[in-house]
Image (tube, rainbow, N blue to C red):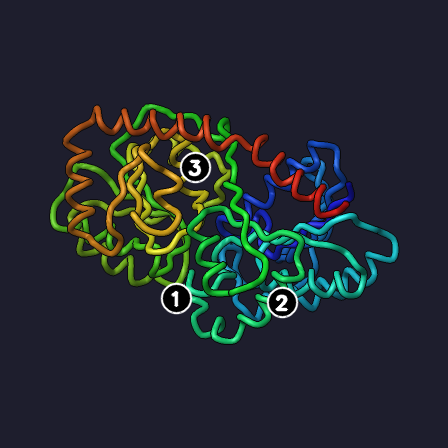
Amino acid sequence: MKILMLNYEFPPLGGGASPVSYEIAKGYAGLGHTVDVVTMGYKNLPAFEQKDGINIYRVKCWRSKKEICHPWEQLTYIIAAKRFLKKHLKGHSYDINHTHFIIPTGIISLWLKKKYNLPYIITSHGSDVPGYNLGRFKTLHKFTRPTLRKILNNSKVAVAGSKFLADLADKVILANKKYVVIRQGFDFNKFEPQEKKKIILSTGRLLERKGFQYLIRAVADEDIGYEVHICGDGPMMAELRRLATQSRTKIIFHGWLDNNSRYYKTLLETAAIYCLVSAKENASVALLESMSAGCAVITSNVAGCPESVRDAGIIVEPENAAALTRVLKELINNPNKVLELGKMARARIENDYNWNNIINEYKNILTKSHF
């Protein structure tokens, strides 16, 4: 098949959805399909490159940061991608379009279907669904539901990476098209546990809903004998740094790190404990990374987090620093429990997140959608 993939978030840009879409594209190419990705340009990134069998086209847009894309910047992607595809489709044809995010990307897909009769499937990742990310898109989503519904109803299949997100989307968008759940995969060999150090690691965009502030408060009153390392950037950086100055436990900020870099890899592989206490999370790639690296995982008891860890991690109430303090102290005082949870987490990745199985599920959907 000739597959067009649309996503404004594609490595090295974006958050958790970015590497997921890359792995899916790589998986399609590995099965012998032609895969062309149309994504956002950024600074000195090449307008075209081939990687892992994927043809990557980057259209010139406004984008100020690698890690986050504002709605007005997404609009420039819609405009630029349409302009590019009008020319591109004169010499290229596709059997199916795999689109990531209902908006902004699905707007382009709906246009492609109407103008070129190109069928599409949609994978939602969280922020495109009303009610998922209230911090950034609450106002915007007051006006998006009719558009979301139209895009979903015209898709062949709508996919979510967790039952939590699928249920939320079905409930709030009320489209005729019901979501199918396909768990996102993970490359078991990407990380290899090393000798663990007294490090508590937390990663992601520094947004209020991610809960970094509660982690800092949980360790602030006394030196717990571990260092807390925070990787990422975002609007809460200044506030988090201010909170960290009041902490007796050492807090280290690394800023935004490429999760494919040797530095990040070593940091994650040597961290004993990984903490993500987000109030909203679909199917966190960061959690899967930490589980693969053999970390003892602490995460939220809401949204898609319990689906990800099941019994291979500890779940706590989000926005509750006192509860997080209790769990951290229990782990710190029980090193064998830390090692046991790390082994369980890695085994879950190996057994339940095999990319080959995930890609075959998507391939079956694409095949049925095309024919």
Mark earlier in primary sequence (1, 3): 1
Instruction: Measure the C-alpha gap from mark 1 to mark 3.
Output: 25 Å
Mark 2 element type = helix
What amino acid is found at the position of numbered circle 3 in the picture?
A: Glu
Q: Nearer the viewer, mark 3 or mark 2?
A: 2
> x and y percent of residue 71 in the render?
54, 69
Left or right of 36: which side holds 331?
A: left
> Circle 3 sits in a helix, a strand or a loop, which is it?
helix
Whether residue 47 appears in this view of the structure is yes
Q: Residue furthest left?
A: 222
In the rendered image, the residue lying farthest to the right is: 91
Q: Identify residue for label 1.
A: 135
**Residue 267 coordinates in the image, percent (x, y):** 38, 35
The quarter in which the C terminus is drawn is top right
Amino acid marked by disc 1? Gly
Q: Which residue corresponds to the image point at 20% horizontal and 27% vertical from the top-left?
A: 335
Mark 2 closeness class: few <14, some 14–19, many ≥20 residues within 10 Å: some
Q: Label 3 near label 1: C-beta < 8 Å? A: no
Q: Where residue 199 sits: x, y (%)?
A: 28, 36
Q: Which residue is mark 3?
A: 289
Residue behind mark 2? 150
Lower sequence index among marks 3 and 2: 2
Judging from the image, what secondary structure is the residue with disc 1 in?
helix
Report how many numbered discs are placed on residues in the image.
3
